[in-house]
Image: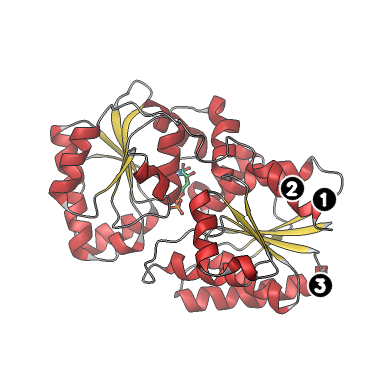
Amino acid sequence: MKILSIIGARPQFIKASVVSKAFAQSESIDELVLHTGQHFDENMSDVFFNQLGIPRPDFQLDIHGGSHGEMTGRMLIEIERIIHEHRPDRVLVYGDTNSTLAGALAAVKLHVPVAHVEAGLRSFNMRMPEEVNRILTDQVSDFLFCPTAAAVHNLESEGFSSKPVKVLNVGDVMQDSALLFSEFAQAPEGVQKKRDFVLATLHRAENTDDRDRLSSIVDALNKVHRTVAEVILPLHPRTRAALAREGLSLDVCVTDPVGYFEMLWLLKHSGLVLTDSGGVQKEAFFFGKPCVTMRDETEWVELVEAGVNTLVGADSDAITTHVKTNFLRSIKDEDSLYGGGQASRNIVRHLLGSR
Ligand code: UDP
């Protein structure tokens, strides 16, 4: 079976690292990897290929920047050409980026079955570009590989049970990566001796592209750093640009984006995770850390229901208060919410079972 995997953004490299390994272990699967170029530099792309042993892409596009429409449109043209030429049996896409949507759309129009890893997640906020991408991708997918029971439930509510497609709770591939690579955790340069800090990440457009929200979050980060614990923030390029544009300054320990092994070390040694990332909310949980999420809603509702993740939006006082209350609290995965590290294996099994 020839599978064309489409990746392009940081979280997709991390997800693909385990799925591509599972493909490589199967004699019946021949994987081709296409990198759209959505994330492209050393910090946001190369480091993950080097650390995680992801196969070098067979096709490397160089598409980044521009508006959503422009980026997605350019990807669509190139991906269509490659599918036409190489005729894969399945196209596999991850998550909710423009690369996901472009890959799914190109494939379905050429009648190539689409497999969507991380299907069924919903924030119910259509102003998020990610929500639009994931809903449209689910609509044209044949294999909807859901990471959680809540994701399956979302698809059932949208009527997927009566469609001739496969909706499967396979577990979360990010738990596979966290388990597989945990032993390689390594301290980022300059922070070896630290522990019990607040690990922060910030990059959602709803926060970076809204001056009021961004300024309130910056205020909270500075306050937490002054009054609760040191804040370490590997800064996303989008956020760096937004801070410069708005003339806002952070008074915390800011680093460039770090590699995955460094991120695993930071997760393990932190006393709390403060984030607006999707993936990092779960990684906090995998490493037994409380999480405070700077968003108004989350796709990972089971963490909020389990009382290990608190949604605080962008309100400065709420962020500071909840960080204070939860700092160093211990968290346990009582119910194996994310499948326990079997997701990639399940994906391979279901894809091969479908021949
Ligand atoms: N990550 C990383 N280095 C960083 C920040 C994040 O390796 O400096 C990893 C993080 O551990 C997680 C993934 O990138 O595995 C999450 O990506 P991101 O937050 O960019 O995207 P989201 O999950 O919100 O789509």
- The picture places residue 335, in percent across and down from the top left corner, at 48, 34
Does residue 294 show up? Answer: yes
- Say whether residue 111 is left or right of residue 202: right
Q: Residue furthest top?
A: 193
- The picture places residue 340, in percent across and down from the top left corner, at 57, 35
The three-letter code of the residue at mark 1 reads: Ile
How far apart are the alpha carbons under marks 2 and 3?
24 Å
How far apart are the alpha carbons under marks 1 and 3?
19 Å
The three-letter code of the residue at mark 3 reads: Glu
- The picture places residue 78, in percent across and down from the top left corner, at 67, 74
- Say whether residue 150 is left or right of residue 304: right
- What number is the disc on residue 29? 1
Are dots 2 and 3 in contact, CB under 8 Å? Answer: no
Q: Is residue 241 above or below residue 348?
A: below
- What number is the disc on residue 85? 3
Q: Secondary structure at mark 3?
A: helix
Are dots 2 and 1 in contact, CB under 8 Å? Answer: yes
Instruction: State the residue at coordinates (44%, 27%).
Output: 187
Q: Is residue 191 above or below residue 159?
A: above
Does residue 257 show up? Answer: no
Q: Secondary structure at mark 1?
A: loop
